[in-house]
Image (cartoon, rainbow, N blue to C red):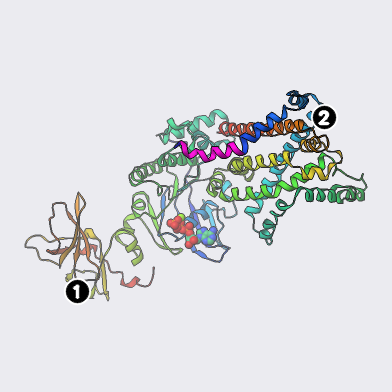
Amino acid sequence: MTRPASTKPLSISLKSCAKTFADGTRVLEPLDLDIHAGETLVLLGPSGCGKTTTLRLIAGLEQPDAGGRVLFDGVDVTAQSIELRNVGMVFQSYALFPNMTVAGNVGYGLRIRKLPAAAQRARVAEMLAMMRIEALADRSIDQLSGGQRQRVALARALAVQPRALLLDEPLTALDAQLRDALRVEINQLLRELGITAIYVTHDQAEAMALGDRIIVMSHGRVAQTGTPREIYHQPASHFVAGFIGTMNRLSGEMGANGFVCAAGIVPWYGGHSAADEILFRPEDVRIAEEGEPADLVGSVAAAFFLGDRTRLFVDVGDRQPLVMESTARCTRGVGEQVRLRVDPQGVLDLSSQRGSL
Amino acid sequence: MIYLLLPAAAFFGAFFLLPMCRLFLVGGSGTRGWSAYTAILTDPVYFNALLATLGVAAATTVATLLISAIAGVFLQRHRFPGNALLVSMLTLPLAFPGVVIGFMVIMLAGRQGLIGALTQALGGDKWVFAYSLGGLFMGYVYFSVPRTILTVMSATEKLDHRLEEAARSLGASTWRVVLDVILPGLKPAFISAGAICFATAVGAFGTAFTLAARINVLPMVIYTEFTLSANIAMAAALSFVLGAVTWLVLALARTAAGSTVAAAG
Ligand SMILES: Nc1ncnc2c1ncn2[C@@H]1O[C@H](COP(=O)(O)OP(=O)(O)OP(=O)(O)O)[C@@H](O)[C@H]1O
Ligand SMILES: [Mg+2]
């Protein structure tokens, strides 16, 4: 890959940016956001939570309600329209110009900037090479596959050396395999370029893989901000815990030796708590060794062979069965009794956050 | 599979091919014989009428597309009070016969017309152009603009907004967005609406008949040959040529438009 002459990456701030649409619906509560120079920030959340709206505020395609401000490197750009902000955009629908070839699309921003023809050709060639689509230069857009279109869209956005790259679910329209491949590629590209990038997705795996930081959103608010690890291991609320990955929940009450529930006692070293529910991830529970004392005892409700491992659903007398994973060689059948150990480090008590998001 | 084409072929044969062949043959059956066709090119009366017809139709098409493009995109993109009423009123002229449209042109640009009164009041000459090609042009534009606006509006509604946003994110000004995204996106609508506009202007008769005095367009000439001179053969020859030339112009326009698509790419 070739590296374009790098400009200093941009830092972006939103100051109490709310958004109410003309029909009166408030889709963003006043939002404060700091996006560090050069980082990849992922906006993650369920459909309709306001991710696209946030991205469009940053791009300049929407105006925040009165009082909201958008700062680029500390400079107020709230009143500046998108064509002056110099941000690259990549859409889920690609939004390639159908009346231009691949090269025409990639070179569009350069033509607007009236670069000399030779410089334009050189830059277009460079971008096509970077996205490995040199062979497609003279194709028309309707002769491209979805993955190829997204590469062209990326090349077009990056050709003008934007100050930041804004991507709105760029991979959602692609099939799973292509999505994985392009995700790796985009990740590499963003690291290589060191560009400030804001990536919208509702796919948590994508968010985990790409984000330096993730902002989880819900109903127009920020539910949690943090690195993928923080979000995964220390979810701040039930909403985040449930939205990211799989979470087991057990109800019961705190006792002297741990959390007492129907199937046994889960170790708890977190001190005094009035929790009536604890949570832990599937990977924090395992089948107890022969002769090892068990924390919980249940029976297999269902088992799915996934190739490299087996996913077990274990009935422990709670509303929902526990989800856990076991080695592929595990041959437990439905109805068989299993003895389980829970890693105390993975046990979460979110009872104090109940009621928040 | 070929049988599926039969209904279309039967329709085409019965209502298009047969009458056209018949028209062509009748055109050569008069006292002049086949030279009726060459007369259209050599006789200045016929030839000038042909040129005038095509000229007015072309001018009408260009003016209509220009006005409708601006108005249609604006009406679709901007909501204001009365927008819906205005749009629904646009269909009105379609229901008027050519005579009514001719009458309206006279009221506007005739001897007692509004425009004449206005220019006179402003201290200039009294403008009267209702009874010339100018009047005809005005009537045709008046008739074609509303329908074309509706076509442009529905095409505008179908445009992909993201394309415009993508162009703007790359630095394109409003004007460049219009030029690079909106106009290319509306091109198919322009071609089909323009073709209908042109064909209508070539063949329209009622308006020309109402404004008759100094206008010599082909439909009028055909009418004269047919009713006054009872020269059926000449009328048929003129009709055939009128149809053929219209078809040719539209085919050429389509090809030209198609190649600009390729060239722009
Ligand atoms: N122009 C608009 N007018 C009114 N409401 C709107 C408008 N655009 C979006 N909304 C509403 O704002 C809310 C947030 O929309 P937004 O597009 O930001 O969601 P999102 O998080 O991107 O969702 P998705 O994952 O489905 O794309 C939605 O409820 C949507 O219906
Ligand atoms: Mg969205």
Give the total number of marks visible in the rendering.
Answer: 2
Mark 1: amino acid: Val
Q: Determine the chain carrying the residue at label 1.
A: A
Q: How far apart are marks 2 and 1 (CA)?
A: 107 Å
The x, y position of residue A9, in whole percent, is: 47, 45
For residue A347, side relative to residue A151 (left or right): left
Q: Name the residue under label 1.
A: A260
Residue bounds of the magenta highlight: B2-14
Up-down: is A331 above or below A25? above
Q: Does the magenta stretch include residue B5?
A: yes
Element assignment for label 1: strand
Between residue A256 and residue A137, name the one nearer to us.
A137
Up-down: is A29 above or below A128? below
Residue B182 tag number = none
The x, y position of residue A322, in whole percent, is: 22, 64
Residue B45 tag number = 2
The x, y position of residue B25, in whole percent, is: 68, 29
Callout 2: 10 Å neighbours few (<14), some, many (20+)?
Answer: some
Q: Does the magenta stretch include residue A164?
A: no
Q: Is residue A267 in view?
A: yes
